[in-house]
Amino acid sequence: MIKPIVDFELIFGGNTSLIHPDRFAAGSIESLAQATPYPVNKVPCGFSGLSARLEPGETATVYTLVGHVNDIGKINKRSKDLCSPAYILDKRKEASALTRELTDDVATKTGLPVFDEYSRQSYLDNFLRGGYPFIFDNGKEGAVVHLYSRKHGDPERDYNFFSLAPEYYSQGNGNFRDMNQNRRNDVFFNPKVGTFNIRMFFSLIQADGYNPLSVEGTKFRVAQGMDGELEKLLRASAAQEDYDKLAKACAGDFTPGKIINAISDQGIRLGIAEEQFLSELLTISEQHFAASFGEGFWSDHWTYNMDLVDGFLDIYPDRYEELLFGESAYTFFDSPVYVLPRSEKVVISRGKVRQYGALLEDEEKLNKLGRKRNAAEWLRVNGGQGDIYRTNLFVKMISLSLNKMATLDPYGMGVEMEANKPGWNDAMNGLPGLFGSGMSETMELKRLVAFIVEAAERFGHHTVMVPEEIASYLEGVYDAVQQYQTGALDSFRYWDRVAGQRESYRASVRYGISGLEVEIPVKHVKRIYAAFLDKIEEGIRRAEQLGGGIVPTYFRFEAERFEEIRDAEGSPVITRYGLPAAKVLEFKAYALPHFLEAPARGMKLANEGQARTMYDRIKASDLYDAALGMYKTSVSLEGEGDEIGRIRAFTAGWLERESVFLHMTYKYLLSLLKAGLYEEFFSEIKTSLIPFLDPAVYGRSTLENSSFIASSVNPDPHVHGRGFVARLSGSTAEFLSMWIMMMAGKRVFRYEGNQLQLHLNPVLPSWLFDERQEVSFTFLGSVKVTYRSERAANTFGQDGVAIQRFTLTTAGGDTFEVDGPLLTGKWAHEVRNGNIRSILAVMR
């Protein structure tokens, strides 16, 4: 064994820049190894040095292991194995095989091997950020634990702290938006995930419509009343002398990894397999979501929740009604941070009205309710002193959409950034102070409201029980919308009234809710939300006019008239930040230069004709980088002031400023596909999708995503088209959504006439088929689907090929021929249940 050098000064001497190894250059390895290390008050390091004389043709190999263990004795006990090159190489092969096995969920074979491997790498990167859904099968939906998940603290972007639990079945921390986005397609790759992600991310939405930033791995606790079942399980599973040890491990909150760590560390002997024990233990346990406020309320995190709902209904359309009304398991996260009313955050700064210091870390609430700052807490009844309030998904959707509806800006266009943070583009961090609003969020609000209208139409026979505070808020906003639509309120007065209602509502739920509920017919919800939808669409039209045909992504608002707020003695009211408070009497909206995000989100809501018009306008604008054939985050921002945010400090064509930000470009490409612009999509991906790029220009492997690609407006011509900052991002989620639509199509499962139908309707160009005119992929994580085309043609368009016949092979090896173009009833269920091993679909 080589003793490692753990004191960096033995290598670098006094050169703390670490640019040149001064001491190593001047001495021998032997002398460094004999020197006394002082590994204190220094950055940790590990160097393995070998001195050897090699004859021609000889080699020397150094094996270095880096890792973590909670007891060095474990390493010493295994030192014989760990010093064996064969053991190390076997472990390396095992890790590689595991990676291949995990990515078999997305195994693809087309005529372009680089595309196939890129699909695997994207899937791997996606679950490293969002987690791999591991199911502890218990005969039902099972318990879901997301393995490997971690915040995107990558080597090239190391400011994002991330942690992984040092245990088996390890779960990591992450951000709400990231995990939400990267789990979008979980249910497609593993249908047993079921409603887990929907329950998690909707439950984390607060009563005020915001959400915590930091999300941790989930924990379990044996359910109340299940102590007897636990004792039976432990008696049946553990040896008598190990019973107390295992019982102690299962007490209180635990993770699957904590249980297995205890079994391993304490030598607990089980009479059944570990995974079976965990499955049975989790069956009698409740799963708890863990999260904390973090550092702010972003305006866009909630916009990814509907992706989870749409993804679920693509696989389980027959569970639509049950999803919305059948499960009262949804809660409201309750953070100790309060969004202040306008009277405490609208201030006068340098003669202008601004919105600063919107959040209050609510010490009064913590003290009143006896809570800890970073503990995961939930909205409770009886003013916060009673039980956790639970409801169904439909009511959660009403609450979320109502809060966002009541946060539309004074022109009724964008959703206001009234809680200190912008949306996805963090570099626009000055906009909240400028009363900024975002049209991207309005597009998603329209989508959510339209979903509620459609669901209320379908399930109008239901009634829902709504907390009295939300019910009053709902009726108040509805009344204001009606008065606006009849002309009794103009745009500003409508905004002022609804903003006041929002503030009153937040005050009413600050410490909790009463627990009293109001029964509301779903038919009435439809009337309300149809009016909301009309109001939203009017705002979108107004925004499009201000944007000259392209919907702006951002607006800022200047107070044209305002008054200083004074107290009873006539003195100015000074806010907690030392600035005088103000009341705005009139606003004027200013559209910022165009960004790609709002059009990308809006296009997926448009019909094909509208989408094509939008596409043509965007391609004719400066959002399109003709030199690269790619789309930029924005047009030039040279005319904007620095007050919009740190984006103005970036060089053009770099980071979020006018670069090709991969996540956003991919979001736009996906929208083309969703809108039915297939020819345009396949034309664009040849210059925008990473596997189709020239590696010499891209500057790294074309299997690897970058954070952004420097655009041609960057002053340095040598970086044009080069990718920078390889990191885990939302680009993988966007690509996997493209992959699913390309391979399987839209609305794969449908429920019509009380019968489940499987519609495989791929969107594939002829040039993606291989030499045998075949494309194959893994469907639902386990079914190999092969399309065999009898002629070279696209699978879309008037002259495209379509499925004529299926050959199904069961898990037992039996084959069945079924006429296309779809599978109905029994066969659709057999495929979804994982009882079909492969499908050959012949197309002509």
Image: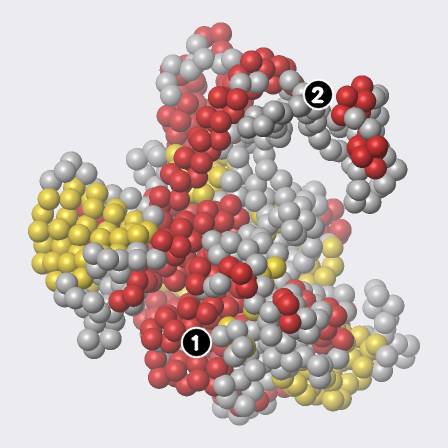
What SS does tag 1 mark? helix
Image coloring type: secondary structure
Residue 668 shows in this picture: yes
Nearer-the-camera pick, 373 or 723: 723
Q: Is residue 161 left or right of residue 233?
A: right
Using the image, determine if residue 73 lies above or below residue 43.
above
Circle 1: residue type: Met
Q: Is residue 454 left or right of residue 399?
A: left
Residue 508 shows in this picture: no
Which corner quadrant of the image does residue 320 belong to? Answer: bottom left
Circle 2: residue type: Lys
Task: Name the residue rendered at 59%, 84% in the picture.
Answer: 411
Q: Quadrant of the N terminus?
A: top right
Q: Which mark is residue 207?
A: none
Query: In the image, residue 187 lies at what x, y percent?
Result: 37, 50
Query: In the image, residue 810 lies at what x, y percent?
Result: 16, 41
Nearer-the-camera pick, 85 or 214: 85
Alpha-carbon span between mark 1 and mark 2: 60 Å
Closer to the observer: label 1 or label 2?
Answer: 2
What SS does tag 2 mark? loop
Using the image, determine if residue 827 lies above or below residue 694.
above
Q: Which mark is residue 603?
A: 1
User: Which circle's residue, 1 or 2, is located before the other in the chain?
Assistant: 2
Q: List the residue tagged with mark 2.
A: 3
Which corner quadrant of the image does residue 115 belong to? Answer: bottom left
Using the image, determine if residue 538 lies above or below residue 17.
below
Query: In the image, residue 219 lies at what x, y percent?
Result: 53, 36
Query: In the image, residue 175 lies at what x, y percent?
Result: 59, 52
- Outermost residue on the bottom side: it is 487
